[in-house]
Amino acid sequence: MAISGVRRLDAASFSGTTSGTTSPFQSLYWARLKNSHGWTPCFFSYMHHDSPCGLLVLVRCFPLGQKLAYVPFAPEGCMTGVDMEVLSQAILSLLPHGVFVLRYDLPWGTPGLQEDFRISRLRSCKESVQPVATVRISLHKGMSAVYQGFRQRCRRNLKKAVDNGITIRHWEKNATVLSQWYELYLGTARRDGFSPRPLPYIKDVLEVEESDGQADLYVAYDANGDLAGGIIVLFGRQEAVYLHGSSRRDVFSMGASWLLQVHAMEKACEVGCKVYDLHGISASHDGRGHLGRLDLFKTSFGGEIIDRPASLDFIRGRLRRRAYVMLENLRYSVRRGTV
């Protein structure tokens, strides 16, 4: 059997496992962060074709004792639909009572499962919790190779940033800097149409530290010393991920956003990360639609465009899952202004 030996772990034991994924979202850092915001982390180990793997599962409680279990960016490897069923059944047997669905956001580059889901309890979701496409920059050969991969749009805007006197600084854990950045972040959310994270969550993102993860804020200033933008980047053991960003509308054309990302890539190289993930572009990644400008921005750094399947549900309670998905799809529609 491809999957065997599934068992629960404590956090200390999980930190010593081979997680089977390089994603910072499968880390003690992410578990601790989410534990402060309504999710209970559960840790597992299992064998996949005789290779040891670990898995972080996050559990969220709803009224009447109902629970949703969620696996971010795992498991990796050549998992068949049968493998996913066996793993899911074993995990559910070890989770608290009341879990009606086990949802997976599979890792980047995972091929779609080809099995006939009509005879199983696996279902692809209409919407995904995490993006289904991204741009990932390889850092294996150092920043000199990264610079060579920049496209003309990126090179042009980096030159603009230098010519316009844009400077990048670390936030130095300064509460005033964070407050200024957050106000700019709220304005960016209104302008670009996304839902901003609450300030307490952002503070925890920056304050939580674990051996396998830590986030940092880098801010850009214009020639007058005014805040022009900033980004929060999560540094894992092998990957760095761009999480949150903000920018003044009037300085986007000055190149600050490009200079911020390059600065973060340089820091990722310094701490030994092998990949920098710009974390999310449109599914079509063709530079069109409401995410067109975002696509053009992120693809200008070169790198590799990688896709993954939509979120995948292993269903324990069909009616409860159906009700949850209906409410979830309604929430997405309201957020997009389509209802």
Image (cartoon, rainbow, N blue to C red):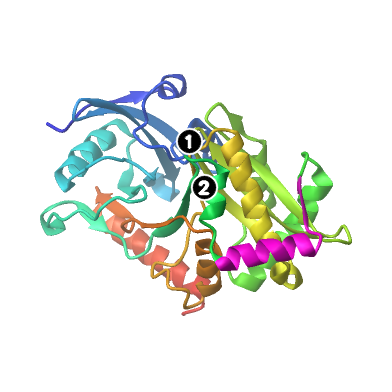
In the image, is 215 to the left or to the right of 24?
Answer: right
* x and y percentages locating residue 234 in the rendered image: 57, 42
Residue in front for this viewpoint, 128 or 91: 128
| Residue situated furthest right in the rendering | 224
Q: Which residues are magenta?
A: 152-169
Where does the image place residue 243, in percent across and percent down from the top left?
Answer: 57, 51
Three-letter amino acid code at the position of disc 1: Gln
CA–CA distance between discs 2 and 1? Answer: 18 Å
The part of the image, by quadrant, that contains residue 180 is bottom right
In the image, taking residue 319 as reference, residue 184 lies left or right, namely: right
Residue 238's mark?
1
Image location (x, y in percent) of residue 259:
68, 56
Q: Residue at coordinates 73% horizontally, 62% vertically from top-left? A: 161
Q: Return the residue at label 2.
A: 145
Residue 131 in sight from this viewpoint = no
- Residue 22, which numbered label? none
